[in-house]
Amino acid sequence: MNLGAIQRRLLGLISRAVIGAVNPAAKCQTVDVSMIAGEQKAGIENLEQYGFTSHAQAGAEALLLFPDGERSHALAICVADRRYRMTALAAGEVAVHDDTGQSVVLTRTGIVVNGGGKPITFTNAPKARFNMDIEATGNITDRAGSGGQSMAGMRDTYNQHTHPNNGGSAPNQKMGG
């Protein structure tokens, strides 16, 4: 093999590409891409980190690896989307985020969960235990899925109730709130 052929194979090991479509249903997600000079590839395996997965939008960028130095079999080893990348992290901070503003950020001062204006739902767990004080700036509702009552509503009911056996007197101590 001459030097020119070796150089072409080395240059062909890695390529940048733009994602066109994603097939998330396969055991190993696949992507269709467009590379430099309009070269198209379909069904490229997108190797994701264990425990993490995503479904990139069209226009995201990928780094392709061609293990044998020719274009017959490619692997996407990194997919990123600069349009939605979080840019305000301090050195050492880590984030999981999407394109709608939802994120979990491990900051230097604590963990920040941002629901992006959408509900945050915990599912398929028999209980949630918090070994800390809990503060809520909004309302807390008990048994919300089955006609429960808010803590503010319970507080109002308690503060307004009277004791019929004690001359109709109101509680001598109100619930704060």
Image (spheres, rainbow, N blue to C red):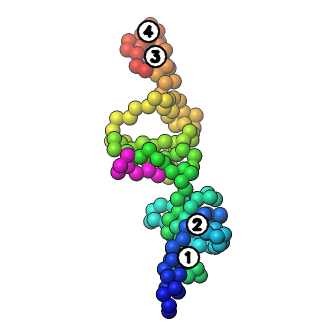
User: In the rendered image of this protein, does residue 24 appear above or below residue 132?
Assistant: below
The image position of residue 14, as x and y in percent, is 51, 73
Residue kind at label 3, given as amino acid type: Asn
The image position of residue 29, as x and y in percent, is 57, 68
Residue at image coords 42%, 42%? 112
The image position of residue 71, as x and y in percent, is 58, 80
Q: Residues within 10 Å of mark 1 (few under 14, many from 20)?
A: many
Say whether marks 3 and 1 touch (CB < 8 Å): no
Separation (CA) of disc 2 from disc 1: 11 Å
Residue kind at label 4, given as amino acid type: Ser
Residue denoted by label 3: 159
Q: Nearer the viewer, mark 2 or mark 3?
A: 2
Residue at image coords 54%, 50%? 84
**Residue lying at the far bottom of the rendered structure:** 1
Residue denoted by label 2: 17
173 or 14: nearer the eye?
Answer: 14
Residue kind at label 1, given as amino acid type: Ala
For mark 3, give the secondary structure: helix
For mark 2, give the secondary structure: strand
The image position of residue 61, as x and y in percent, is 56, 61
Q: Nearer the viewer, mark 3 or mark 4?
A: 3
Q: Earlier in the sequence, mark 2 or mark 3?
A: 2
Separation (CA) of disc 3 from disc 1: 69 Å
Separation (CA) of disc 2 from disc 4: 76 Å
Residue denoted by label 4: 169
Magenta residue span: 90-97
Q: Earlier in the sequence, mark 1 or mark 4?
A: 1
Residue at image coords 40%, 51%? 94
Q: Which mark is residue 74?
A: 1
Is residue 104 shown in magenta? no
